Amino acid sequence: MQRYFAKEKNGNSFILGSDDLYHIRTVMRMKDNDKIYVVYEKITYICCLENVKNDIKILIEDVVENTNENSLEVTLFLPLLKEQKMDLVLQKATELGISRIVPITTSRSIIKLNEGKEDKKLERWRRICKEASEQAHRNTIPEISSVIDIKNIGSLPGLNLVCSTVEKEKNIKYILQKKQDYDKINVVVGPEGGLSKEEEGYLKEVGFIPVTLGDNIMRVETVPIFILSIINYEYME
Amino acid sequence: MQRYFAKEKNGNSFILGSDDLYHIRTVMRMKDNDKIYVVYEKITYICCLENVKNDIKILIEDVVENTNENSLEVTLFLPLLKEQKMDLVLQKATELGISRIVPITTSRSIIKLNEGKEDKKLERWRRICKEASEQAHRNTIPEISSVIDIKNIGSLPGLNLVCSTVEKEKNIKYILQKKQDYDKINVVVGPEGGLSKEEEGYLKEVGFIPVTLGDNIMRVETVPIFILSIINYEYME
């Protein structure tokens, strides 16, 4: 059954965005009395469609028992990547339960955001995360913040990790297994070519722990997928 | 420094494939006396180029100390996927140290291999793995076997796992943490829609353990990347 995130709840019916209505009518060719899942404020409802062709009504029929959405909040600080790679990371991070993505600029980032283009990019990234959330049957859509410079990250509550190019000894497993009682994890990933020593030094100062990811040499877009997979694994019950 | 896998060793020089020579001359525009890494029979050499424009010579200058290529052998049984998804899995699996990929057909696979097209596909898949191995500085290229039907998998030495749609209790963490002394792991991943009960039953008969991957609902191409990430993590030292 298809799943959509509602914009608004209106008594016993929902209001969906125009993209979603297009999807219902034109892509899925749904008919009156067809059922869909609608998620609103982290709750999933079973809804029935009425008057699909004209002024569509999306009526609540039932509430689905709350699935166990992870209580662990993971934030990924992600350098700007080429469009295709950015899209891939956003989609996969959403599937792997990410809570929040903060795009960052770093001194070695090749990709720059053109003045005035950020809003359009954010809109695109948010759409990708919304669609991936629907596909992955999530009750929440990851939040995507505005682009910030790495030097604006600051001190954060929780376990703070930075993928290091300098650190040789402490791997991510050592750190994750030592510290299992956090409800927030923040991870900073570097761009191609890695973070500069100065950037890593700065993050260390504000409380980020530099870690290695083992012996594999991964492309930059693989790193967040790898890290989110192992965080999921480490917190699997 | 660029890295290539040699086809042949000839005294103190190497013979590379025509794709690699094209890459050296036309893509990288290398010149005489430029250096490259050449991998041959799992050993990495530093080589010097001579006579790049005509009858190129690739002369050994030094041997690089053996990097710790993982001694764990992981084989992935992967259903045929759409081209772009297949390419993604092959590339990422190579980065994550896979030893062998066996493409499989299953009853619910939507993608079929057209008669007579297998050789061309295998050539494409092998090229992707070779290029990804070079990028990831591997000493080996993953082996890609011919396509087989899932019912021909048979009993295999090592830890054998199948991503289950039936199993509810045993997650992959429970199994991996219980059995850490294997040097071979074989993993069967299902197509979109999962394996049939019959297929899963068959694999169980020949010794595969059905496991769940936790609460996330992942796209089919995400599953192998997730599993290889956590196997890397579990065997990280």
Image: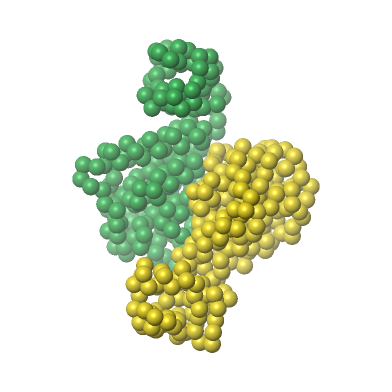
Chain colours: A green, B yellow
Q: Which of A1 and A105 is in front in this view?
A: A1
User: Residue B214 location, x and y as percent?
Assistant: 59, 41
Number of labels in the image equals 0
Say above or below: A36 vs B227. above
Q: Is residue A129 left or right of residue B228?
A: left
Say above or below: A31 vs A79. above
Say above or below: B188 vs B144. above
Q: Is residue A119 left or right of residue A159?
A: left
Which residue is painted at 67% across and 55% down in the image? B186
Name the quadrant containing residue B43. bottom right
Which residue is painted at 74% across and 60% down in the image? B157
Looking at this rendering, what residue extends furthest in the bottom direction?
B11
User: Residue A138 location, x and y as percent?
Assistant: 49, 33
Looking at this rendering, what residue extends furthest in the right direction?
B205
Location of the N terminus of chain B by quadrant is: bottom left
Which residue is painted at 42% across and 53% down in the image? A221
User: Residue A34 location, x and y as percent?
Assistant: 53, 18
Name the quadrant containing residue B76. bottom right
Say above or below: B48 vs A59. below
User: Residue B212 location, x and y as percent?
Assistant: 64, 42
Q: Which of A111 and B57 is in front in this view?
A: B57
Q: Which of A134 and A45 is in front in this view?
A: A134
Which residue is painted at 49% across and 48% down in the image? B84
Report whether residue A39 is seen. no
